[in-house]
Image (tube, grey):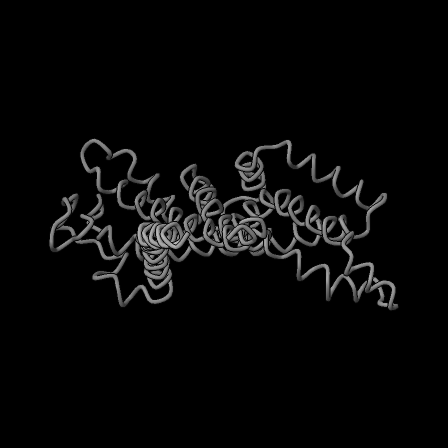
Amino acid sequence: MREAATASTVWRRAGRRRLVPFRLRRLAAADSFLIGAGIVIAFIIACAIVPSLIAPYSPTAMLTDSIMQAPSSAHLFGTDYFGRDIFSVVVYGSRDSLFIGFASVLVGGLAGGAIGAIAGYAGGWIDSVLMRCNDILMTIPGILLALAIAGALGKGLFNIVLAVAVSTIPGYARIMRAQIISIKGRTFIAASRSVGATPFHIFWKHVLPNALSPLLVMATIGVGTAILTGSGLSFLGLGVLREIPDWGTLLSQGRGYLTVAWWICTFPGLAITLFVLAVNVIGDRLRDNMDPKKNASR
């Protein structure tokens, strides 16, 4: 019996020694992706807030002796057909691109969350009317809806924000409604009613705080989608009319020079790709941490 117990103990210790490094390696790999994503997001946000500290040239400076230069030590991303430094233009162009992404998610998340919360908590004919209108919007692809709204409103930063925000409202409304319906039928809500709490107090103190987690995760991932949609509208000529173009406008301006000056399109496209990828990595981690099923299984 002692020999069997000793063998079992040795086997368990060996298994632990094999298992722990595997978990540490897996955790380190995940954290490295998360740290990298955080660095990318922090750098791009710094570019939008203090571009003058990062960009080596003015975004409107036309260096006539350096037109269409390939990437070099003097011009990290090369220059365009006006002689502008591409790196400086990308840094300054991040302002409008990030503003479109964050502002449209804020507006769309608040509007969609409010619609979903009212529909889910009120129920009855209010739920039916709001959700049928929401279903009509959901039948239209988001990019097509944003394109139609932007075309109707015209060019402009706030018009693009509104167009992208409206296209995201149906998704936020569906998520919020499902969470509200799930939470309002739980035991602690019935207990609050039994002690005389008002419906508004129950909603504000108990239902809404417990329903926000999926909405926050969706909003985090939605920033990347909003930037892609806004860049797509700018690429099609419905973007912001300014001296300093955003990332989508840069792509549109450089597409005619792709065979002779590939860097004009490539680096703005890489900026969009890196930021969207970084936001998705952080959004996936938030989703994993806020998923009660995964947390219960750990």
Which residue is drawn at the image coordinates 79% and 67% (left, top)? 201
Residue 262 in view: yes
Q: Taking 136 as reference, is 72 left or right?
A: left
**Closest to the observer, 84 or 226:** 226
Q: Position of residue 293 (x, y in %)?
A: 58, 49
Please provide percent x and percent y for residue 54. Answer: 26, 64
Q: Is residue 101 left or right of residue 215?
A: left
Q: Nearer the viewer, residue 36 or 61?
A: 36
130 horizontally vs 149: left or right: right
Residue 254 % position (x, y): 28, 39
- Say above or below: 205 vs 278: below
Q: Nearer the viewer, residue 151 or 232?
A: 232
User: At 32% across and 48% down in the image, what residue appears?
Assistant: 271
Q: Is residue 93 visible?
A: no
| Numbered circles on residues, count | 0
Of 199 and 243, nearer the camera is 199
Q: Residue at x 74, y 41 (%)?
A: 131
Q: Position of residue 180 (x, y in %)?
A: 72, 52
Looking at this rendering, what residue extends furthest in the front direction? 1
Residue 270 image-quadrant placement: top left
**Drawn side of residue 103 relative to residue 88, left or right:** right
Relative height, residue 97 to residue 198 (above, below): above
